[in-house]
Image (cartoon, grey):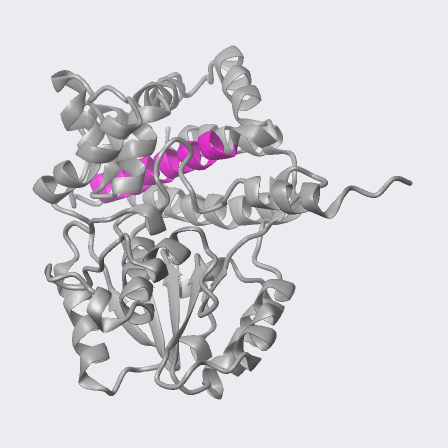
Amino acid sequence: MTRRPQTETIAAEEAAPEADRLEGFAHPRETAELFGQSAAEAALLAAFQSGRMHHGWLLSGPEGVGKATLAYRFARYALTAPDERASGPGLTVDLAAPSARQIRVLSHPALLVIRRPWNMQSKRHAATIPVDEVRRLKSFLQLSAEAGDWRVVIVDRAEEMNASAANALLKSLEEPPQRTIFLLVAAEPGRLLPTIHSRCRRLELPALDAADLERAVAGPLAAAGVERPAAAQAEQLAGLARGSVRRTLMLAQGGGIALYERITGLLASLPRLDGEALHKLAETLAPAQAEQDFAMFFALLQDMLGRAVRHGAGRGGALAGEAAMFDRLLGAGMGRAATLARWAELWETIAREKVQVLALNLDRKSFVLETFLRLEAAHRTAA
């Protein structure tokens, strides 16, 4: 068997797609500005400047609100010489400084990033963060930092660690090396071990308000050559985005409004599903290369189910045009409470099984079909 030259292997690894990069847009570590999270940034900066920096931080909050951007901003600040820090507010650093450039290309010796790896054979990302990724900590931490220098470990989407990886990380959190800071980024912190929670200081980042969201997405959309949504769609897009920069960019670039309309069209066809439309949608989402669309689809669907339950419970939340559809799907009268309970349970089932589909590389088309068949059954029960 012919072995690939080492230079080819290295080049292939460097060109591998990143699980935490939204295709077509800059990665969080390449993002110069952070919008709407001044309180969280100030908390990290104050702790660092106090000389009593906690070794473990859990940066939590909805997906796409700046958690990873904040983590890399802090890494740049902590690993850059004081005279290279810019005079701007917060964790501002001269992006032309040598350390900042190294962090941008992930070559800084004092920074370790742990995340889902890319499998060169299967041409897809691992479904979870395996223990081997966390074991890289051992050699990283054995490297002696120069006197007075810091080391930073970023675990991106920490909730994606499998059980072995989580336990391996816990050992380092329990016995933290000196001048080493762990930043765990998690949109679903409830999936992390309670013992990991107890060893980290939690910093919650909220969803962005309309003004900050508008400022945050303007630059990336322009840089990617993506047209801003028309005025008629802007309000709908804002409702679907839920204050998330990542989701706004994904929806604006990837036909999110059209996908949302396909979902509402299928729900509107109940109690008799449009089988042809359903199969076409499932086939679109099934290929491995449609991973981003698959994620966007289930994010939209689960949000819609959540809004339906809140609406049915009298707590509002329905977007324009959804209220009448939700009322029809949930039914009325004495049985409405039971129907709401079934829909809430269905939301949890879909969330749990989606994780299993990704982790075990199960048939995505079958999962999409089964999901809508469950919705159909829930509606017939309500009727």
The residue lying toward the viewer, choosing from 220 and 348, is: 220
Q: Is residue 305 shown to the viewer in this render? A: yes
Query: Which residue is at 58% across, 49% downward?
Result: 127
* In this picture, residue 144 sits left or right of residue 359: left
Q: Is residue 333 shown to the viewer in this render? A: no
Q: Which residues are magenta?
A: 291-312
Residue 210 in the image, given as x and y percentages of width and height: 11, 40
Q: Quadrant of the N terminus?
A: top right
Q: Residue furthest top?
A: 276
* In this picture, residue 307 sits left or right of residue 23: left
Residue 14 in the image, given as x and y percentages of width and height: 56, 45
Query: Which residue is at 33% across, 25% downward?
Result: 253
Residue 324 in the image, given as x and y percentages of width and height: 21, 24
Question: What predominant SS class does the magenta segment belong to?
Answer: helix
Q: Residue furthest right?
A: 1
The residue lying toward the viewer, choosing from 40 and 15, is: 15
**Where is residue 375, by image quadrant?**
top left
**Where is residue 300, by image quadrant?**
top left
Number of numbered discs on residues: 0
Q: Is residue 295 magenta?
A: yes
Q: Is residue 274 above or below residue 349?
A: above
Q: Residue furthest left?
A: 211
Query: Which residue is at 59% across, 69% downward?
Result: 136
Query: Which residue is at 51% across, 78% downward?
Result: 170
Q: Is residue 203 magenta?
A: no
Q: Is residue 203 above or below residue 103?
A: below
**Where is residue 192, by image quadrant?**
bottom left
Q: Quadrant of the C terminus?
A: top left
The residue lying toward the viewer, choosing from 31 and 159, is: 31
Residue 310 in the image, given as x and y percentages of width and height: 23, 44
